[in-house]
């Protein structure tokens, strides 16, 4: 009580003192300024930079629409269902390219997904610990190889291999299906799909691995405690829990496959034709742009190519958005990785 | 089933699982393990094959001329890719100068200011989506934006295209790395009266700097091998060029042109170029690995 009583008086004293001559500390703080202006401008600067990401996407969208106006008006929606591609008479349709893109991407997925799942299962559940880091490092190295190097390798190694070994073998054993008919030049839809599969494998497998690592260990232990074998544990405890995320990872791979340009351009044969045979040369949306854009004479030709780019942009954005949402739904909380 | 009375079995006599069932389950287990190992081997095979071919074909054609000469005309022996290496360097420096500051700033916004807000989430999502936009689309967008109004291809346009491709990667890694900086450090700085901007720059960014550098290097390595966005922006050049508003050579472009050419001499140079490109990328990725493992958040926790 004794200590309290003088306190107000001393506080009064100090405030009255402060009113007359502020303390050294107060003086110092006053002289420094609040930093409010600097804070606000820093926050605004950061916000502007962050918003550029928005603007970039909007801007790409706008500029693609603006430049493909001519072809949008001339062909409308029919652009995507017409087979014609005749720059000389100005008759354009994107169907062969859509067919080539879908065919190669889906075939690549069919080859890559089981393998990627196998790698992810091996790395998360089976692999001895000392081997884990080197193998995942190697499979990430696969992701770091530029697509033009894949293309180079495919042109000089995979194409001859397809032409002389794998192609004839497939024609002999699976020729009755009708998918492996016609002359086999080595370049074609199948070769493009194989190189695409090799390219999207690391993306799918590393994402799947992250998703499977995010499954809590208690799930695994619970299933094992019920007497499950390791495979049953993986199937019931891990795969079932992470299936949405795995579908997301597969769709991210699909997004990458749809837009892949250089390696596919180098081995697909570049011929706008729809053919059932996988040996036949094809053409994809991305590779037609890569091949013909710089020699596009005439405004309609140019805007038709831009419209193909617009279609590719929209499709990959939708595929990626769905995939991201799926992956987020599963790995929420766990640190995600930049692919 | 629930209406049936439960048959009470005497304890101490547990039902033994049938031997066939156990054998089947065990076989499935082994089968899947085998398949997973096989899949890993199948996946690593192309990597080994690609690296083997690169070294085998590339190393035999690497020589001093490759690093000092410009491409020789068709039919002449020799020649190199000196101008392409220099051009790639110029374009990448341009791209880094534009892309990395914006990317880091956006990451700072996401982590320090926009966390939990709608705008923050929207920007994060857009960055992820931008990451998936095909590089060829980026190429034609920049062509329409920069090259078409200027009426000539330029190194600057190539730099912009690559910068845009770098931004999402840099942003997302910066954000993730900043998220790992403990709050206690920020609070300590704020408690000492340090303004928020200074806390973000000198405390958060500095603590997370090894991780952020890793992200920048990864983005750099990723765009270093990009060819498609340069096709219609940098365009390529057979001669020396250091001007930013003129077409410039780039290593990936040169590899592409040489790979699809019909000349053996050019194929040889393409392999050598690919080896140099891969070596550059692998060295940076490996450095990143070492960097990330050793220096990871020394100040944290």
Image (cartoon, rainbow, N blue to C red):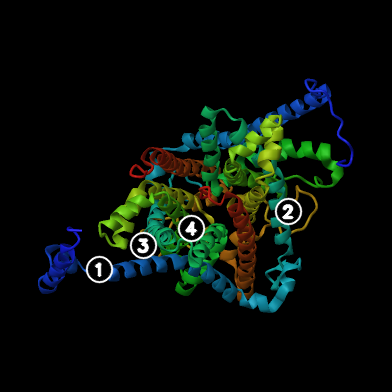
With A112 as the anchor, is A137 left or right in this view? left
Mark 1 or mark 2, whichever is nearer to me? 1
Image location of residue B258, percent across then percent down: 53, 49
- Quarter of the image that includes the C terminus of chain B: top left
Question: Which disc, if any, is residue B168?
Answer: 4
User: Quick one: SS at disc 4?
Assistant: helix
Q: Mark 4 lies on which chain?
A: B
* Residue occupied by mark 2: A103
Mark 4 or mark 1, whichever is nearer to me? 1
**Cα–Cα gap, marks 3 and 1:** 46 Å
User: Quick one: SS at disc 3?
Assistant: loop
Residue placed furthest toward the front: A1
* Residue occupied by mark 1: A34
Q: Quadrant of residue A311?
A: bottom right
Neighbours of disc 2 within 10 Å: few (<14), some (14-19), many (20+): many
Q: Dots 4 and 1: beta carbons under 8 Å?
A: no
Q: Dots 3 and 2: beta carbons under 8 Å?
A: no
Question: Which disc, if any, is residue B243?
Answer: 3
Image location of residue A218, percent across then percent down: 61, 38
Give A295 or A96, whichever is nearer the viewer.
A96
Q: Dots 4 and 3: beta carbons under 8 Å?
A: no
**Cα–Cα gap, marks 3 and 2:** 42 Å
Q: Do marks 4 and 1 both belong to one polypeptide chain?
A: no
Q: Do marks 3 and 2 both belong to one polypeptide chain?
A: no
Q: In which quarter of the image is residue A6?
A: bottom left
């Amino acid at each position: 009580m004794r200590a309290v009583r003088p306190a107000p008086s001393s506080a009064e004293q100090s405030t009255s003192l402060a009113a007359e001559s502020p303390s050294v500390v107060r003086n110092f703080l006053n002289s420094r300024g609040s930093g409010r202006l600097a804070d606000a401008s820093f926050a605004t600067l950061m916000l502007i930079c962050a918003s550029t990401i928005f603007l970039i996407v909007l801007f790409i969208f706008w500029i693609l629409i603006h430049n493909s106006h001519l072809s949008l008006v001339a062909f409308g929606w029919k652009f995507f269902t017409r087979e014609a591609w005749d720059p000389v008479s100005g008759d354009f349709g994107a169907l062969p390219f859509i067919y080539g893109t879908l065919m190669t991407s889906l075939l690549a997925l069919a080859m890559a997904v089981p393998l990627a799942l196998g790698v992810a299962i091996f790395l998360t559940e089976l692999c001895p610990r000392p081997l884990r880091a080197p193998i995942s490092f190697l499979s990430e190295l696969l992701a770091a190889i530029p697509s033009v190097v894949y293309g180079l390798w495919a042109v000089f190694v995979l194409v001859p291999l397809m032409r002389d070994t794998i192609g004839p073998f497939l024609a002999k054993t699976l020729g009755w299906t009708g998918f492996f008919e016609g002359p086999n030049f080595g370049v074609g839809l199948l070769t493009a799909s194989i190189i695409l599969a090799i390219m999207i494998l690391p993306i799918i497998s590393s994402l799947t691995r992250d998703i499977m690592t995010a499954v809590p260990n208690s799930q695994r232990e619970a299933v094992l405690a019920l007497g499950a074998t390791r495979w049953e544990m993986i199937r019931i405890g891990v795969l079932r829990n992470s299936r949405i995320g795995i579908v997301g990872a597969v769709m991210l791979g699909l997004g990458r496959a749809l837009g892949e340009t250089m390696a596919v351009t180098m081995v697909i044969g570049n011929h706008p034709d729809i053919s059932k045979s996988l040996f036949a040369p094809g053409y994809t949306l991305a590779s037609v742009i890569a091949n013909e854009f710089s020699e596009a004479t005439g405004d309609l030709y140019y805007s038709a190519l831009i419209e193909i780019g617009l279609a590719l942009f929209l499709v990959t954005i939708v595929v990626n958005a769905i995939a991201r949402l799926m992956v987020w739904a599963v790995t929420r909380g766990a640190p995600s990785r930049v692919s | 089933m629930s209406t049936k009375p439960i048959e009470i079995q005497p304890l101490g006599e547990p039902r033994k699982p049938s031997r066939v069932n156990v054998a089947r389950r065990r076989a499935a287990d082994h089968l899947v393990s085998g398949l997973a190992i096989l899949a890993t081997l199948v996946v690593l095979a192309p990597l080994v094959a690609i690296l083997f071919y690169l070294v085998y074909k590339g190393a035999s054609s690497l020589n001093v001329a490759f690093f000092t000469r410009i491409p020789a005309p068709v039919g002449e022996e020799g020649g190199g890719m000196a101008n392409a290496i220099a051009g790639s360097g110029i374009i990448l420096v341009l791209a880094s100068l534009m892309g990395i500051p914006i990317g880091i700033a956006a990451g700072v916004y996401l982590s320090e200011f926009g966390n939990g807000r709608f705008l923050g989430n929207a920007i994060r999502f857009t960055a992820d989506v931008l990451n998936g936009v095909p590089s060829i689309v980026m190429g034609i967008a920049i062509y329409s934006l920069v090259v078409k109004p200027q009426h000539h291809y330029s190194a600057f346009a190539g730099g912009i295209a690559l910068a845009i491709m770098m931004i999402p990667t840099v942003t997302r890694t910066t954000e993730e790395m900043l998220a790992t900086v403990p709050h206690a450090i920020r609070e300590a700085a704020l408690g000492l009266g340090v303004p928020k901007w200074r806390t973000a720059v000198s405390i958060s960014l500095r603590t997370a700097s090894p991780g952020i550098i890793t992200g920048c290097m990864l983005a750099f390595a990723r765009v270093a091998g990009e060819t498609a966005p340069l096709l219609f922006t940098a365009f390529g050049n057979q001669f020396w060029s250091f001007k930013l508003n003129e077409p410039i050579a780039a290593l990936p472009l040169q590899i592409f042109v040489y790979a699809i050419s019909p000349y053996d001499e050019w194929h040889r140079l393409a392999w050598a170029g690919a080896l140099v490109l891969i070596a550059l990328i692998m060295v940076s990725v490996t450095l990143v690995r070492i960097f990330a493992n050793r220096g990871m958040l020394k100040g944290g926790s």
